Image (spheres, rainbow, N blue to C red):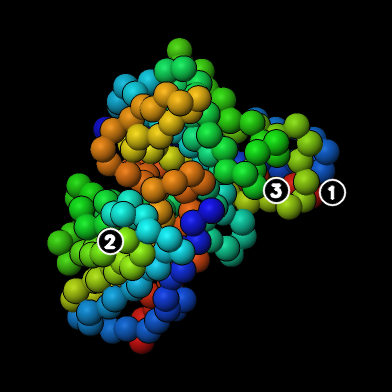
Amino acid sequence: EVQLEQSGAEVKKPGESLKISCKASGYTFTTYWIGWVRQMPGKGLEWMGIIYPADSGIRYAPSFQGQVTISVDKYINTAYLQWRSLKASDTAIYYCARHPGTYCSDSTCYGGEQDGVDVWGQGTTVIVSS
Amino acid sequence: DVQMTQSPSSLSASVGDRVTITCRASQSINSHLSWYQQKPGKPPKSLIYSASSLQSGVPSRFSGRGSGTEFTLTINNLQPEDFATYFCQQSDSIPLTFGGGTKVEIK
């Protein structure tokens, strides 16, 4: 069974750093893009970016570029989302999501035929409050 | 960025009804459109990809249609477990973008 298991809820203060994780199982981690989606309290879904674990090729949404860092450790099948300095406006649920489609990074394209997201993690709640 | 506009933002329906949700893209996205269902306190669940293909395990009362800029999600014979919020998402170009959501409530 394909699963994405995310790390637990976090409560942090503004200015603190944070790294949350998403451990994949049940499939070949290096052959699917994996990414992150934000959901602020009571709001809709926002796509943040994706990474291709085989070579760490990465694509960010412009609104999140420079605000967060997406990374991966392909040897332990785990993706990460990291902040250097949290703000109150980072308070949200963050979902990791497997993307089975084809996307390109640095003119190299990888992936499959199916678009969108096919598997979601359970979500990590991040609360940033002084 | 491709803007995705869903309508209506909410609707009330009864068990057994047919419900249709519309998603419009600000430019052509071919058939790169997915639909998701989200219940309170839960992660989204993937329903449909490539505009009309059902994810494995999704009941056949869910169907999707469309291409280019206009898409629909139809739920036939609405069941109690279908009351939720539905989101569309385009994956034709990065950044991938979601519609604002449609909340399906019990009448």
Q: Do labels 2 and 3 share a chain?
A: no
Question: Which residue appears at 23% of the width and 82% of the height?
Answer: B17
* Distance between mark 3 and mark 1 Cα atoms: 13 Å
* Distance between mark 2 and mark 3 Cα atoms: 35 Å
From this view, report whether residue B50 is shown above or below residue A59. below
Q: Nearer the viewer, residue B24 or B6?
A: B24
Query: What mark, if any, has residue A91 been given in the picture?
Result: none
Of tags 2 and 3, which is closer to the observer?
A: 2
Q: Farthest residue toward the left?
A: B60
Query: What mark, if any, has residue A130 been given in the picture?
Result: 1
Task: Return the chain for callout 3.
Answer: A
Give the residue number, with chain letter if any, for mark 3.
Answer: A90
Residue B50 x/y as whole percent: 27, 51
Query: What mark, if any, has residue B67 been given in the picture?
Result: 2
Q: What element carries label 2?
A: strand
Look at the image and tell me whether residue B3 can be seen.
Answer: yes
Q: Which amino acid does label 2 sit on?
A: Ser
Count neighbours of disc 1 (C-alpha within 10 A) and say few if under 14, some if 14 to 19, many if 20 or more.
few
Q: Is mark 3 on a helix, strand or loop?
A: helix
Q: Which amino acid does label 3 sit on?
A: Asp
Q: Nearer the viewer, residue A109 or A111?
A: A109
Q: Are marks 1 and 2 on the same chain?
A: no
